Structures are given as C-alpha cells and as structure tokens.
Amino acid sequence: MKSKSTSTKAAEMSETPLCGLPAEFYCAADYDAGQSTGYLMRQILNSVSQQVSRELEPKGLTNAQWVPMLKLYLGKASTVAELARVCELDAGSMTRLLDRLEAKGFCRRIRSSDDRRVVNLELTPEGREAAKEIPAVLSRVQNAHLSGFSVEEWQNLKGYLRRILETSHSLQAANEKHDK
C-alpha cells in the first residue's frame, strides 16, 4: 500500500470539514473576525497611525494631513487632481484638507497660467520644514512596531504583504473587467 504524497496530505490538512476546499483559510461556520488577517492588519495600521499622529501633532499635522504633505514633499504629485488620486481621496475631501493645510501656512495653491482648470500645489518653506520630519517619524514608529523581528522575518513579512496586495490588485482588475 502506497502512502499519500506530501502535497495530498497538505491539501487534506488545509481542508475544513464544512468548507471542504483547499486554500480556503476561513469558513463561515467557525469564522472569528478577531483572528482574520484583515482585522489584524487594520489593528496594526490603527496603532501605527495613532503613534505617528502623536509624534506629528507638535508640528501641527493630523493623521489625514501628513499623508498629502509627504506626497508633495516626495514629488509624488504637483496638482490638486494628482494629489487626490495618490491619496485616494475625492476632490471635495482634498479641497477641504488643502484648505486646512493652507490655513496653517504649509502649502499654497497656484492656478496654472496654461490651463485655468489645473491647480498646482507647492509646499511653503514651513510646509517643507514640517514635511521633512515625516520620514523620520514613520521610520521610528514602524521600527518600534517591528522590534523583536529579525531582518529575515521582516523581509518575509513584506513579501507576504506584497503577495496579498498583488492578489488584491488582480481581484480588483477582474471585478472591473466583469463590471464592463
């Protein structure tokens, strides 16, 4: 009598009695939201965001404000439309956020002389000064959250997260294709 192959055993081990399909990590019958990867990632993101906010508060930046400030500082966007896109915000939300940043003296909007529909953005000297602190804060907070990890574990974690993100992009593309 032959023994089962390793891959067959692994497939059987990943099956759950009520779901029955390999690679289904969750099953409605015994779903525990507190143990889901989505919940755990959200909890980590919330913790990182709260700590970053605490550290940037003395600079006058809220959690919602430091992201666009960093994008402008790193040259990821130069217009209101680009910034809204890279920050994944709608135009109205971006306008309100920029109103607050302008009121604090961190940025200014400049209407394009070539196309009046385009509004360019630039950081003020005060905005550049505040924004240049953001990478150091992000590095410090993330390193604190990763304390106890080896470099190899950190690299593996990033690889796993990239795989989830790539799968997410594939699912999104398939949904968009299906919706057309």
Image (spheres, rainbow, N blue to C red):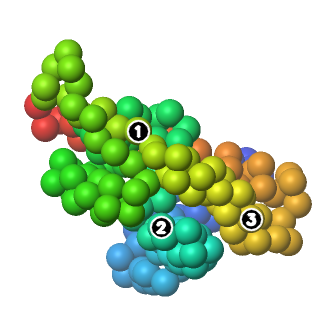
Q: Are marks 1 and 3 in contact (CB under 8 Å)?
A: no
Q: Residue 81 in the image: state x and y as whole percent.
A: 25, 37
Looking at the image, residue 178 lies above or below residue 57: above
**Mark 1 — residue?**
122
**Mark 2 — residue?**
61
- Kindly identify the residue that appears in the image at 59 percent across and 52 percent down: 129
Looking at the image, residue 158 lies above or below residue 177: below
Q: Quadrant of residue 112?
A: top left
The C terminus lies in quadrant: top left
Using a 10 Å C-alpha cutoff, classify the residue at mark 1 as few (fewer than 14 neighbours), some (14 to 19) or many (20 or more): some
Label of residue 140 in the image: 3
How far apart are labels 1 and 3 at the CA level? 27 Å
Depth check: give the residue in front, 121 or 46: 121
Using a 10 Å C-alpha cutoff, classify the residue at mark 2 as few (fewer than 14 neighbours), some (14 to 19) or many (20 or more): many
Q: Is residue 131 visible?
A: no
Depth check: give the residue in front, 106 or 25: 106
| Relative horizontal placement of residue 167, taking residue 130 as reference (left or right) | left
First in residue order: circle 3 vs circle 2? 2
Q: Residue 10 in the image: state x and y as whole percent.
A: 67, 56
